[in-house]
Amino acid sequence: MITIDFFYLLVGLLFAATAVMNLRDRGNPRRFSSALFWGLYALVYLAGDHLPPLAAGLLMVAMALAAGFDLVRPGKAQPLPESERRASAARLGHRLLVPALAIPVVTMIGSTLLKDVHLDALPLLDPKNLTLVSMGCGAIVALALACSITRASPLQGVREARRLIDAMGWAVVLPHMLAVLGLLFSEAGVGKAVAEVTTSYIPMTSRLVACAAFCIGMALFTVVMGNGFAAFPVIAGGIGIPVLVGVYHANPAVMAAIGMFSAYCGTLMTPMAANFNIVPAALLELPDKNAVIKAQLPTALPLLGVNIVLLYFLM
Amino acid sequence: MHTAVNLWPLLGIAVVVAGFLLRAHPVLVVIAACAVTGLAAAMSPVHILESLGSAFLKTRNLPLILLLPLAAIGLLERAGLKEHAQASIATIRSATTGRLLTVYLFVRELAAAFGLTSLGGHPNMVRPLVAPMAEAAAEARIVAAGGRLDERLRHRIRAMSAATDNVGLFFGEDVFVAFGAIVLMQTILRAEGLEVDPLHMALWGIPTAVSAFVIHAWNLRRLDLRILKEAGSKR
């Protein structure tokens, strides 16, 4: 069975390689602390569940401090000159698209056709992490295809991956750390406290106010938590079910569908949803880390208004 | 029925909001919010660190989707994938940035609605293909008018490419019955004693999904107008 542990190992090795390459790169003004940062992250993936929780917690704090005090810097990239890339593009043409498209294709094949394939009574792909494992296989197939088309070695692939990881820097770990904060929020009962405050202080005296409070509450709570899945139970339990369904006899399916989409409007507006908003800004090398959020505001805000109106008339 | 709820953990949210408003380093904001939330919930420092540690290990599957494609994408970039995408789009005369991104939005949203959420994404589609093509389409217009694509507009186009991927994914996937969000909603409503058919939740999502497409396509049209204006001013 191909399990997610295999890909944890690969990612751990990739981070370890990033650490070593940065350590040996004299072009990196902070090579020791950068290497330490990526080395610690490699440990999270290589040692995994063997790490005691206390050690993992200390490790996370150490990484956060290194990133927060600007000790993680990119090394010196050695890209090919543009003329060489153009020549290579002209030579290889559409063949360059094949590995890029192999990733989604293999992911889809893995998560649909190979879902029920078994080897010796064990499923071929880990059913608990089917999409991730399929995507990992897709990435390996794509790397193999890319190596054969461009006649580069897999080691060059690792160098290129390190270049991209370096360019993103600490933005790579931000979504991971935000997920940790989300789990801590729920352990500490933040959701309950928010539900308490919203339901005790907003008067739900009219149908429109209730609809608006529900949709805006979903969006705002998602802005804070960075995740619609965290907002939905709180606001649906606090406003949706007791007020919209209980008092105004809303159709629960409409309430749920539009509520979740209102939460997604919040996701478009928050740096807390780092993997959708901050990481792409880093990946596209934008100087303003909030540029993607700014581009999304003119879609998210009107759509939230539309949601309130739709909920009012459809529920 | 009124049990006392501990409101102190809300301080954690206050730290997050204040941190982002003061433009503090996001990673430091997260760590500070973790410390404040834990202390407000009367956890001991060791307990907080242990909670953070086990959560950090439990969620380490999250970055995989970003990291795994990087080696292949990096190699292709070195071999000129961006340049190839740009050269291909420049040969299509009717291609504008807005139209190109609208087509991508349509395909991305429709594919996600059929459960094909992996057909896209920032590391494997937006960075190597969509953003370079969107930039090249604008560049072709502006260069034809004798100008140069300025950096601010270039960055705006890149940000819009990433935004288009997000909008398509978010408002498509929730229309798909087997998607996690629908399962989550069903579970939560069931716990509250409401039995809801997942198909109905998916169907009632369609009006919003269509509105999202229309609003975002309109914003892309506005981007096109801005590019045209830029090209016009260079004439």
Image (spheres, rainbow, N blue to C red):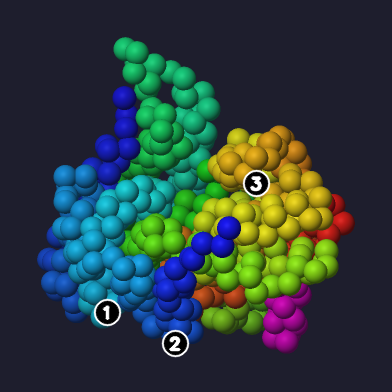
Between disc 3 and disc 2, whose residue precedes?
2
Q: Which residue is mark 3?
A: B174
User: Which mark is drawn over residue B197?
Assistant: none
At a point 16% along the width and 51% down the height, the residue shown is A52
Position of residue B219 in the picture relative to residue A264 (left or right): right
Task: Specify the quadrant of the image occupied by residue B23.
Answer: bottom left
Looking at the image, residue A123 lies above or below residue B95: above
Q: CA distance from mark 3 to mark 1?
A: 38 Å
Disc 2 is attached to a residue of which chain? B
Pick out the residue farthest to the right: A313
SS under mark 1:
loop
The quadrant where residue B101 appears: bottom right
Q: Which residue is mark 1?
A: A70
| Both marks 3 and 2 on one chain | yes
Image coordinates of residue A260 in percent, x first then y, are 65, 54
x%, y% of residue A105?
51, 35
User: Is B231 one of the magenta-colored residues?
Assistant: yes
Callout 2 crowding tier (Cα within 10 Å): few <14, some 14–19, many ≥20: few
The answer to whether A187 is drawn above or below residue B144 in the figure is above
Three-letter amino acid code at the position of disc 1: Asp
Circle 3: element type: loop
User: x%, y% of residue A69?
Assistant: 26, 80
Please provide the residue range marked out in magenta: B220-235
Q: Position of residue A129 (x, y in %)?
A: 41, 36
User: For the residues carrying marks 2 and 1, which lies nearer the camera in this image?
Assistant: 2
* Mark number, residue B22: 2
- Magenta region includes residue B222: yes
Mark 1 chain: A
- The three-letter code of the residue at mark 3 reads Asp
Subunit under mark 3: B
